[in-house]
Image (cartoon, rainbow, N blue to C red):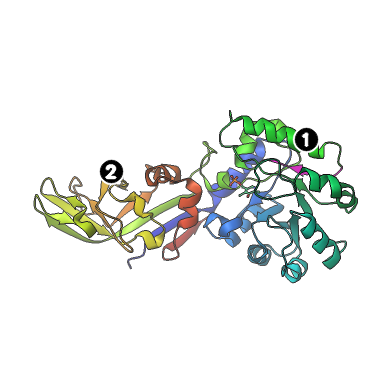
Amino acid sequence: MSSGALHIDLDAIAANWRALDALTGCETAAVVKADGYGLDAARVARALARAGARRFFVAMAEEGAAVREALGPGPEICVFSGHMRGDTDMISDLALTPMVNSLDQLTRHFEALPGRPFGIQLDTGMNRLGMEWDEWAAVAAVALAERPVLVMSHLACADEPDHPMNAYQLDVFQQMTDGIAAPRSLAATGGILLGPQYHFDVTRPGIGLYGAAPFASARPVVQLDLPVVQIRALQEGEVVGYGNAWQAARPSRIATVAAGYADGLLRSLSGKATLWHGDTPCPLVGRVSMDLMTVDVTDLTEVPEALTLIGPHQGVDALAEVAGTIGYEVLTSLGARYARHYHSR
Ligand SMILES: *Cc1c(COP(=O)(O)O)cnc(C)c1O
């Protein structure tokens, strides 16, 4: 078998949810959009429901369907993109809760599904989703009379605690919502770490559950081991891979491992990443190709069966840094070809 082994620790995800929950005095929801940040929304949502999460967020109604199927009736499943045209049947049949983003969506929801749950998303300066000040001022009384389950907004710079945008958005959110009866939510993972003023009634962590920054004390969730297909000896001066991008400066042993950019291992890792055999670092040499990577294992004393790309010596964030991206992108890029092993007690 030549597929890589992707180990996903569901207990660690649950522990991270509990740790983030313990940082606040309010309800902690869970964001499982993009198939649970690439780790399988159904499995992740079930693990989090067992840990105590009662409210889940997805990006679009289709994702809500998978989560509803996994969780059954009961838990609230909120949809960030709101009530889009064509979503009504799904929202209704699967009891999803759209976070409506505009007067258009609000009207659609009230006309199509009167009396059915909804939330409101406000824009406090990110200019991505949600009603802006004027729109909200015009519809707030009508919308609030229908008792939204949540009124929320999203922070643009919460991973930078000193960024003035945080306090600015907090102030705008308070001005837009102070005095309303509906529960409020502003914080994702970064916002939780900014402190209690940002917590309101419900927090919405995503990335911290999956073990990545900005939740520095998160338990790691993912390990990725890649099988060695072949090992060859090179003489000094021989070259490796597409474009002859690497040349041996000494007699070398090169391992070919079975994963590449088609598995989400970004080509920008070429010539830069490190794989590990136990505690020994082995540099990736040459270019990442579609299905394969080449690794210098000259300094290993034994013949490796597999090398670790994500693990104790190099977490998701460290790998992201090498690739010039963020942990979110590394996780959501992990491909469909790995053999996935889910661990829970
Ligand atoms: C993705 C997202 C979250 C979760 O953010 P993390 O940084 O992953 O914790 C919360 N709220 C909204 C609106 C989002 O889009």
Establish whether ligand 1 lies closer than 8 Å to the Cβ of label 1: no
x, y percent for residue 340: 45, 62
Numbered mark located on residue 292 in the image: none
Location of residue 189 by image quarter:
top right
Amino acid bearing label 1:
Gln
User: Residue at image x 60%, y 56%?
Assistant: 33
**What kind of element bears circle 1?**
helix
Which of the two discs, 1 and 2, labels the residue nearer the N terminus? 1
Specify few, some or many for label 2: CA neighbours under 10 Å numbering under 14, 14-19, or 20 or more: some
Taking the view exactly as shown, the residue that stands out farthest to the front is 134
x, y percent for residue 304: 25, 54
233 sits left or right of 128 in the view: left
x, y percent for residue 243: 22, 57
56 drawn magenta = no
Mark 1 and mark 2: span between their CA atoms? 50 Å
Numbered mark located on residue 174 in the image: 1
User: Residue at image x 21%, y 53%?
Assistant: 245
The answer to whether any part of residue 131 appears in the image is yes
x, y percent for residue 344: 53, 54
**What kind of element bears circle 2?**
strand
What secondary structure do most residues of the magenta stretch adopt? loop
User: Residue at image x 56%, y 49%?
Assistant: 13
306 sits left or right of 337 in the view: left
Specify few, some or many for label 1: CA neighbours under 10 Å numbering under 14, 14-19, or 20 or more: few
Q: How many marks?
A: 2
Q: Which residue is mark 2?
A: 281
Location of residue 16 by image quarter:
top right
The answer to whether any part of residue 51 appears in the image is no
Amino acid bearing label 2:
Pro
**Front-most of 10 and 297?**
297
Give the magenta part as a residue range.
181-186
Establish whether ligand 1 lies closer than 8 Å to the Cβ of label 2: no
